[in-house]
Amino acid sequence: MIDVLELHGIEKSFGRNHVLHDVSLSLAAAQVTVLMGANGAGKSTLVKILSGVYARDAGEIRLGGKRYDPASPLMARAAGVVTVHQGIDDGVVPDLDVAANLMLEELAIGRTGLWYRRSRIRARAAPVAERMGLDLDLDRPVRELGLADRQMVAIARALAADPRVLVLDEPTSSLSSREAERLFGLIDRLREQGVAILYISHRTSDIQRVADRIVAMRDGRIAGEFERRDDDTLDTDAALEAMLGRVVAPADVEARQSKGVLLELDALQLHADAPPVSLVFAPGEIVAVTGLVGSGKTALGETLFGLRKPLSGSMHVDGKDHAPQAPAEAIASGVFLAPKERARNAVIPDFDITANLSLPFVERLSMLGFVNRARERRDARTLIDTLAVVCRSTADLITTLSGGNQQKVMVGRWLSVPSRVLVLDEPFQGVDIQARRDIGQRLRDGACARVTLVLVSELDEALEVADRIIVMAGSTVVGNHLNHGIDVARVLADVATSDQDSRQAA
Amino acid sequence: MIHLAIRFGFIVLLLGLVIFFSVAAGGFASPQSAVFIFQSVAITGILALGVTCTLVVGGFDLSIGSVATSALMLSSYVMVIWEQGAMVAILACIAMGALVGAINGWLIVRMKVPDLLATLGMMFLLIGLQRIPTEGRSIATGMTLPDGSVASGVFSPAFLALGRHRFDVVIERLLPVSVVILVVIAVLVWLFLEYTRHGRLMYAIGSNERASRLAGVAVDRYKITAYVISGVLASTGGILMAARLGRGDIASGNNLLLDAVAASLIGYAVLGAARPNAFGTASGALFVGILLQGLTMMNAPYYTQDFVKGAVLVIALMFTFSLSARRDAGV
């Protein structure tokens, strides 16, 4: 086996955030290496270093035995390392036809001359399409194509440069299983042609299908390598375990068992192919909902908050029907959601801490339409103290705080008013361990009168905060465990349940 | 140092300008001159306060100038051709402004047309529409109508008073009605944006629309309201213009849009706000007024005015964006 690309001791930090620690990895010709890792494990940083977007801080990369130091994506491409990024539409120009899309690099460099001659572009594109087995009308605009075909065009374009290394970042995340199968056929052909492929994915079924080897990353380190064995099996469970990490420290939570019914999900169907979900939650319970990306956790939260409608089934809060049409309605009936990705979904960057905290409930602080600022500040002061937010004053701009402290404010926003159901989607995203403990403690302290749902992909986080852990996969519930003498291996097995498995179970 | 420059630079510049003109141009430092400045910026200022509301929700309203001239034509038409009184004319204009604002809001929120394009389209539509009823001619008492009859209605005295009456304040006939209206509207918009729940949520939408929606804010309703406010204020400006001119002049109001937008953008720089705000907008309008009045009194030719306005705008924007960005970067 010839190693085409070799990485030795790669290090990368952003400010004080050390993202990659001593990463060494080699990719062989005619082999598909799957890179697995939870969010924030460092996969994308690694890909960006390979494709010339970021410069590494230390370490060495060799391509075909020679030093490889791409200063830009264009240079990486010229050297033979081609990346197809996750967002499909970043890879194609929808308003141009297929032929022009395939020749985009040449058009951009200007190698096609001054005049745009359609026939010439088409003649140059035809062999590229043929070599890829791309069965598409070259004159059709890309915007008329389905996602899978667009993905094919993006990959075909990537291959027009005859790459030695192809990096595919979650290429199936928006494809159906049939479309994905076409992509796998293409990958098989490329492998035969001797291309080294780095394939990033969370989907167990994809990995089983294409991988020759799995490399698991965790917290910026390589956590394990798993080769396909001689009997053609792959130990994806072991890889998942390496990626998620065994829980080392015992969870410092005393799991409470609560009685009664506050929230009831009755045959709630979240996805067309998924079996319905029926669950009961007792007052005072903190329930972690865990599962891989795309397992349906967020869909569940959004359904409770009125951002999407269930396909069938119903929800009940305190015995009353709960079918909110919009977030405002959900909030009015005491169901709150702190969304994930706070910079995009939660933070008001122009506002100070006080106004960020009061945003959903500013009506309660108003008299005749005027905001009672003194009361607003007092309330903010109290919340900041209980959440231990590190700041100079309540009038600090939210953007001057660190990520963890911003997150505390975003969670605190929904704690300022008593709720019946509090859903927190990835509340520990980009938050250091101390802030994580603070938030967890605050959630447990105030949990008695409500149901708290914490949606997390990291099992450690679930074990740290929850009384009960629900595992989701393929938009349905595949496991339900009390966090007391919990069998971590079984939870991990549930997490690894593939879409197919969960659907067959129905 | 940079903090002080951002916060007070603009105000210092404004005061410096006043002192300079007071010394350099005789008669600048008089009540009459001050009132004249206010009067010259009254209509622009009212329009600018409307645009400010749309800027606050992260939008923009390019139709304000044409709403104002439409109100000018509509009020003239109502009084001169339909022979109605001042009240009917005013209510018709306000209703027209609110309707145009609501349509703008609907286009942007429901039809998903980008704000600049929706209001640009509306601007063209109104510029054309206001000419149709009179076949492109200005409206005045005694004009011949398309059907051959003669328009016999007149501008009611009560209506004209809006543009021409002056209150006695210390000096007889000092303070024009339009200035009073400007000050009242500026104070109301300022209170509304800074101190009410509604204003707070408008700023939240402008800063992060998605997050506001996820915090339960009825984003669509607030955005439409902002355009309605803008439309109503623009038509108010049009009413004052009609009352001042006393005829439906088809050629008036060419500069209104650009002047109003400039005032609200200059307003970003006032007190280092770096965001649209009512106090800044009013100061911005005043700044332009002072500068032009001073230069005129120092015999600067009229054709340099647009250049001066443009230069002020560019410098103010530089203050806002470059310096504020550096402040945020902690330099």
Image: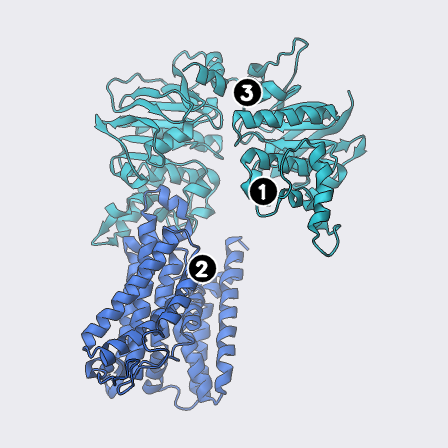
Chain colours: A cyan, B blue
Check the image and report above or below for A218 versus A114. above
Percent across and percent down for residue A460 are 47, 22
Query: From the viewer's perspective, is residue A355 above or below residue A424?
Result: below
Query: Mark 3 to mark 2: distance in Å?
Result: 46 Å
Q: Position of residue A147 (x, y in %)?
A: 54, 35
Q: Secondary structure at mark 2?
A: helix
Quadrant assignment, res A317: top left
Q: Which residue is mark 2?
A: B117
Q: Residue furthest front?
A: B147
1 or 3: tag closer to the N-terminus: 1
Residue that badge 1 annotates: A142
Q: Amino acid at mark 1?
A: Val
Q: Is residue B26 above or below residue B128?
A: below
Looking at the image, residue A395 sits to the left or right of residue A362; the answer is right
| Type of amino acid under label 3 | Thr
Q: How many marks?
A: 3
Q: Which residue is mark 3?
A: A204
Q: Position of residue B92 (x, y in %)?
A: 24, 70
- Circles 3 and 2 on the same chain: no
How far apart are the alpha carbons under marks 1 and 3? Answer: 30 Å
Label 3 lies in what chain?
A
